[in-house]
Amino acid sequence: MATAQGIRAQLHPGVPTPTQASTQREAFECFPFGLLVLDHTGHLVCANREASLLIAAVGLSEHALTCCELLGCRSADTVLDSECVTELALGSGGVVPEMRVELRSRAGVNSLWVTASPIGEGRVVVQLRPGCAGDRRRRVSPEWLSGPRLRIRTLGATAIESPEGPIAGSWLDQRTGQLLKYLIAERRRAVTVDEIGESIWPEADYAVGASVRYYVHALRRKLEPARGAREPSAFISASCGTYRLALEHIELDADQFESRVRAAMASAELDPSGAAEEIEQSLALYRGEFLADLPYAEWALAERHRLHELACMGLGRLADIRLECGLLEGAAHALERLASLQPFDEDVHRRLMELDIARGRRSDAVRRYAALRCRLRHTFGHDPSFKPADLARSARV
């Protein structure tokens, strides 16, 4: 025999029965994490028990409370420095990626993982999950809002950082790390499994293809620990037996360095002082040779040489601009760094010594000359093509 409740469910399938509504209210109230319901302006409509306890713990009142007041939306130096949780949820039309926020009160700092989703009628439900001590993920910048991202430092020692924090460890010096570095060196094209195997492990046997695929899988696990088994990788794309880095999701200091230096040098004729400042700032990205922790990897040599030459061109142009502006100290600093990158280039060292003499630092010029002569004799078996007396005559001219 059908009950009244059953008949009501059949006649109005979209309307919860009293029992269902009671269960939903109980589930909302007893949910183990905080839940908020907000209206389209971000004002609190209702909160479950856990959320109410949290709001009270940070010294706020639920009356007229907004998400911005509670979570620090649009506050400087937070993951939400230019965003509002309510607007993000309503604008996305779906679930907002989980983010970490810090709630500050007299009792200290509470770390929370926050996610939100629209629920109809212009309202938003927000989940507040306590942060876990020691959690590797640390949302420190708003860039994650545009999707998964990595920052990779390749100039000098290799370092990787995701929006959740550094991804470090001994694996960077092992085969998984070698694979990543090879893909970085070949980042402008897709490389085949055979190319990878022959380049990184030239003495491997016929089964190298299986090894490459295994280490690609291991690398993806390192970079994307939360990725599902069948989810596509955000950072390493595969197609027809080839692999390449998904550069739209990766920031490489080498590419930033190159684009900034080239743009600055191109603008030097129109704005010399501005170009010099930009060259100097971009050269700060050049912390060392490309993939310096793999000094003997043949597949990295071409890119290392190309970026080295670009750094030298930038330093040379910077020195020229400083000299044209009469800034001898600035020119000397640029030439000193250039000389360290080109230890056997006599023209660079001669220019630096002439600047020493022009600044009245003859002893520095003599010491530089002696060091250069020793270096050339030891490596090539000959002295510099000029003598200190030549420097003095050039200075008088």
Image (cartoon, helix red, strand yellow):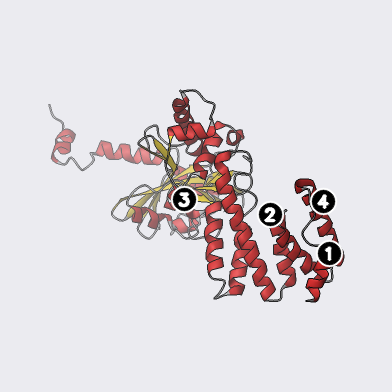
Residue 154 seen in the figure: no
Query: Can residue 197 be seen by looking at this rendering?
Result: yes
Q: Earlier in the sequence, mark 4 or mark 3?
A: 3
Closest to the observer, 356 or 169: 356
State the residue position of label 3. Answer: 144
Quadrant, the C terminus: bottom right
Provide residue 74's location: percent of width, then percent of height: 49, 60
Q: Residue at x 52, y 40 (%)?
A: 182
Name the residue located 45 percent from the left edge and 37 percent from the top edge: 226
Assign a secondary structure to mark 2.
helix
Task: Give amino acid for label 1.
Answer: Pro
Q: Residues within 10 Å of mark 4 (few under 14, many from 20)?
A: some
Residue 24 left/right relative to 281 = left
Q: Are marks 1 and 3 in contact (CB under 8 Å)?
A: no
Residue contact between numbered discs 1 and 2, judged by CB atoms under 8 Å = no
Q: Which residue is mark 4?
A: 374
Mark 1 or mark 3, which has the lower sequence index? 3
Specify the amino acid type for callout 3. Answer: Trp
Q: Which residue is mark 2?
A: 341
Indicate the secondary structure of the residue bearing disc 3.
Answer: helix
Q: Are marks 2 and 3 in contact (CB under 8 Å)?
A: no
Q: Secondary structure at mark 4?
A: helix
Vertical comparison of 190 with 58: above or below: above
Give how far apart the Cα atoms at labels 1 and 3 are. Answer: 57 Å
Q: Can you give x and y, in whole percent of width and height, for residue 137 in the image?
A: 53, 42
Mark 2 or 3 closer to N-term? 3
Residue 26 position in % (x across, y down): 36, 38
